[in-house]
Image: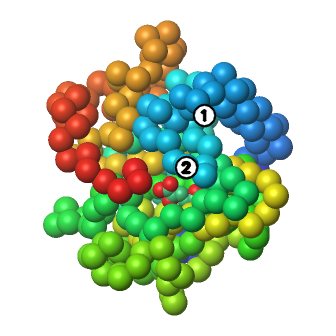
Amino acid sequence: MTDRPVLHKADLQALDEQGFVVLRNVMDADWLQATLDTCEQRLKAEGASAGSEFRQEPGSDRLANLVDKGECFQRLVSHPLLLEAAESVLGPDWKLSSLNYRAALPGEGLQPLHCDMGIAADESGYAVFNSIWLLDDFTTENGPTRFVPGTHRSGQLPQQALSDPLATHPGQQIALGKAGDVILTNAHMWHGGTTNRSAHARRSLHGFYVRGDKPQQQYQKRLLRPQTQALLSPLMRRILALDDPRNDALSESGSGRSGFLR
Ligand SMILES: O=C(O)CCC(=O)C(=O)O
């Protein structure tokens, strides 16, 4: 296990200024393998309905509601580095919005540049934080994520500012890394998947967090089975906002859950 107990100052600075940072070797080999195996089993078991708790995306395999689907996923959303990073972007009032799987399939995967939930920062600050967990190496060939550094500070949405959000942006960077690395992102920063030009799926997980005054993308209290909820620790209940009446009101109605892609 190569977990670091806290984020380095340079990581927090990159997250604040550029809007993203890649952390190396966060998952060890056993955790990574258990996660890959569980995702493969779920894809097989769920078949054509895989991802339907949230959305299905042509050209990508998706799974949703993953906190309900394995211990390896609960470990991920409660990882101390992730919680520290979420708090650095969102402040103390945050919760998990969703944990999803996305695999860009060969020849597919290009997404328009977007901000998660389709929102810019507001008078209360940033509202969305995301983490992309690499389950395969991200290479120049296999559809790594692209980012436009600094755009989280622009207050603009790409669909308003750009004539073609699908086009290559002159300021974009791609994030490369090894399976087991994690990309932390201020999810107001313009980003999106790129085309996978390799012969294999490019697999990842998205651990997505929102500020407390926003609805969860996936209302955890409704989606998690009672037997899962019964075994959760106090920390997991806090992360999932299971005992938060404000979250119940927001997420039951879905009010404010607009959003692009997420
Ligand atoms: O998987 C990726 O590379 C990025 C995916 C993404 O941004 C999304 O699905 O909203």
Q: Secondary structure at mark 1?
A: helix
Image coloring type: rainbow
Instruction: Give the mark nearest the N terminus, 1 or 2.
Output: 2
Vertical relation: 175 (above or below) 168: above
Residue 58, label in figure: 2
Q: Residue 142, image x and y in percent?
A: 74, 64
Instruction: Say the numbered circle drawn on residue 47.
Output: none
> Who is closer to the viewer here, 132 or 105?
105
Ligand 1 contact, mark 2 (Cβ < 8 Å): no
Q: Residue 223 location, x and y as percent?
A: 41, 23
Task: Locate residue 122: give its quadrant.
Answer: bottom left
Location of residue 137 in the rendering, given as x and y in whole percent from the top left corner? 77, 59
Residue at mark 1 to residue at mark 2: CA–CA distance: 24 Å
Q: Residue at x 79, y 54 (%)?
A: 200
Query: Which amino acid type is marked by label 1?
Result: Phe
Left or right: residue 178 compared with residue 116? right
Amino acid type, mark 2: Pro
User: Which quadrant is home to the N terminus?
Assistant: top right
Q: Identify which residue is drawn at 64% across, 66% down.
A: 195
> Pointer 1: what residue?
73
Above or below 245: residue 6? below
